[in-house]
């Protein structure tokens, strides 16, 4: 068993709005949220006051403890207000992908029995249709304004009393994000107030922050990574969050330059852009002090190229999953220069880990041996909503959560994630990690992006199949070129046996490759 080097932190027995905004009065006029496109700014005093007034408005409208409120919005400065207002009113918040189809949205609403929706006017048609399909939705509110819908802006003038709801941080669910569904049907992940709040306290010793730090929120708040790293964590300590509704490289670079951003929390596609895109050279990014990448594997060579180009300490990585609130590992800010390339970090405070054999799950492995990563700690989810069997399959009787990720630990406690158990390609008994081949493909100057899946050939063998996005400067790149490039650099069993050129690699908002979208029906079977 592997244990954290950090001292344990006491469980945070507070509602999430108190855990995050409890020091708002202390930070006062410090900017809490800035719209990175139009400059709209909310101070900590305003954020605290506004979320309390909106909570009163929601309670007056009928929101009660135990209700589920669906928050359906891109990143805006209103998103945190809506989130904390809903939890203060006693609701659990299920966050919804703003680009979800009405049918996808309806399935989520139905699954969690949501009674309320908060959205933005451009997304109203999808929200209305989803509510019709699901049934059970009592009212749709908007963050901005729209005819026929109550607005959170109007609620700021509410004279209703602030709701006084008895919240049990141990049992009551604060957030109900849905797992990405890359390996199955999306499931509601029940995260209690204590689990989310404690995970923030666990992360702080390794990733300290405070007033004066300026964090750019470009990854979506609706995803647990964005909700924690870009919203809850910085707002808990008085940092300033500059909010962007989506990733556009020029807008992103301009925001770093104009708002003097000090910290970036991103996914690998953004690291790739920072390392390779010519536009980066046109902006002053000298305010940056660190970059942390998570949500998907990041190649060590790509991380080094990014940090070298920006004259920064090496890009650090972090590891976790929605079911873990989400963090378990991170490269500490103070150790980025010393961390071995490719590591996703060390165990954060109060967290335990086992590495178990893929062939014998009862067999624990030691330093340097690769197996499935198991995690135990106060951040482990309460369970999957309405799916006790799926919960039991994920969390064993001793409280160990089986991540489905394969990794190993070195003698100094650094974790290296090899791949997903279910994504490993078995070629004639040899295990091939798609992430390893993807990282290699990205070193080719003619390749802009790549994904690898297992493909069954005519002989019934599973072989690596690469989906490749050409650089605009390399239209002549052929399947043979790609296969030869890989063959010259890997063991024979790891060679790519098939190449398909595509316009873009399908990814979740978190940056994870959606391999299921690359599979034919036969390959998905």
Image (cartoon, helix red, strand yellow):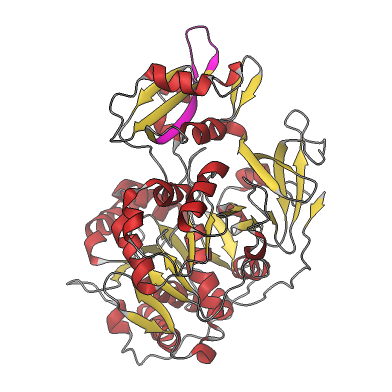
Nearer-the-camera pick, 138 or 468: 468
Residue at the image point whose x is 38% and y is 19% from the top: 479
Q: Quick one: which residue is furthest to the left in this view?
A: 147
Rendered image quadrant of residue 493: top right
Q: Residue at x 34, y 61 (%)?
A: 252
- Magenta segment's dominant SS is strand
- Which quarter of the figure has residue 491? top right
- Whether 14 is drawn above or below 292: the answer is below
Where residue 106 appears, as percent x and y from the top left, is: 35, 51
Q: Please state which of residues 437 and 327 is positioned toward the viewer in this rendering.
A: 437
Q: Position of residue 156 (x, y in %)?
A: 33, 86
Q: Left or right: 316 with respect to 230? A: right
Residue 407 in the image: above or below residue 166: above
- Is residue 323 visible to the viewer in this orientation of the structure? yes
| Left or right placement of residue 258 versus residue 232 in this view | left
Q: Position of residue 457 (x, y in %)?
A: 48, 12
Drawn side of residue 207 relative to residue 234, left or right: right
Q: Residue furthest top?
A: 459
Q: Which portion, as a residue range, is magenta?
A: 448-462
Number of marks in the image?
0
**Toward which corner of the image does residue 349 lie, by quadrant?**
bottom right
Q: Is residue 458 magenta?
A: yes
Q: Residue at x 40, y 28 (%)?
A: 467
Q: Position of residue 184 (x, y in %)?
A: 50, 38
Q: Is residue 269 magenta?
A: no
At a point 19% along the width and 72% down the height, the residue shown is 148
In this view of the protein, which residue sits in the foreground, 386 or 249? 249
Pick whichever, 517 or 453, lies toward us: 453
Q: Where 502 falls versus 32 (above or below)?
A: above
The answer to whether residue 17 is seen in the rendering is no
């Amino acid at each position: 068993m592997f244990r954290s080097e950090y001292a344990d932190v006491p469980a945070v027995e507070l509602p999430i709005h108190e855990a995050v905004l409890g020091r708002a009065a202390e930070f006062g006029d410090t900017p809490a949220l800035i719209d990175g496109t139009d400059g709209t700014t909310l101070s900590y005093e305003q954020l605290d006051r506004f979320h309390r007034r909106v909570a009163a408005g929601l309670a007056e409208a009928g929101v009660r403890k135990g209700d589920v409120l669906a928050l359906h919005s891109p990143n805006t400065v209103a998103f945190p207000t809506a989130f904390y207002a809903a939890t203060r009113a006693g609701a659990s918040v299920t966050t919804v992908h703003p680009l979800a189809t009405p049918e996808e949205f309806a399935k989520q609403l139905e699954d969690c029995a949501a009674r309320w929706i908060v959205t933005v006017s451009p997304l109203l048609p999808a929200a209305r249709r989803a509510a019709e399909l699901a049934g059970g939705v009592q009212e749709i509110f908007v963050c901005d304004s729209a005819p026929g819908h109550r607005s959170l802006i109007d609620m700021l003038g509410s004279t209703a009393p602030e709701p006084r709801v008895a919240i049990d941080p141990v049992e009551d669910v604060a957030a109900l994000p849905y797992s990405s569904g890359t390996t199955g049907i999306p499931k509601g992940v029940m995260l209690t107030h204590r689990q989310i709040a404690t995970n923030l306290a666990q992360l702080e010793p390794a990733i300290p922050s405070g007033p004066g730090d300026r964090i750019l929120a470009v990854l979506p708040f609706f995803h647990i990574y964005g909700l924690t790293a870009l919203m809850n964590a910085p707002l808990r300590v008085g940092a300033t969050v500059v909010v962007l509704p989506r990733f556009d490289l020029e807008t992103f670079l301009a925001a770093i330059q104009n708002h003097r951003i000090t910290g970036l929390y991103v996914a690998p596609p953004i690291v790739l852009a920072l390392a390779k895109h010519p536009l980066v050279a046109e902006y002053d990014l000298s305010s940056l002090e660190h970059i942390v990448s998570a949500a998907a594997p990041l190649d060590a060579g790509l991380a080094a190229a990014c940090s070298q180009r920006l004259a920064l300490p090496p890009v650090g990585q972090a590891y976790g999953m929605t079911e873990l609130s989400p963090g378990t590992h991170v490269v500490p800010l103070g150790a980025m220069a010393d961390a071995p390339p490719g590591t996703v970090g060390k165990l954060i405070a109060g967290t335990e880990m086992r590495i178990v054999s893929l062939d014998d799950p009862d067999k624990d492995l030691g330093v340097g041996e690769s197996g499935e990563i198991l995690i135990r700690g106060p951040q482990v989810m309460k369970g999957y909503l309405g799916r006790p069997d799926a919960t039991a399959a994920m969390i064993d009787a001793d409280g160990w959560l089986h991540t489905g990720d394969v990794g190993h630990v070195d003698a100094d406690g650094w974790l290296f994630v090899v791949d997903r158990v279910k994504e490993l390609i078995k070629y004639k008994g040899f295990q091939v990690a798609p992430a390893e081949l993807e990282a290699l493909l990205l070193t080719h100057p003619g390749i802009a992006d790549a994904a690898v899946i297992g493909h069954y050939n005519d002989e019934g063998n599973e072989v690596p199949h690469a989906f490749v996005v050409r650089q605009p400067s390399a239209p002549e790149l052929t399947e043979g070129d790609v296969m030869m490039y890989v063959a010259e650099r890997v063991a024979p069993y790891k060679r790519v046996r098939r190449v398909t050129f595509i316009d873009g690699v399908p990814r979740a908002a978190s940056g994870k490759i959606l391999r299921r979208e690359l599979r034919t029906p036969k390959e998905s079977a």
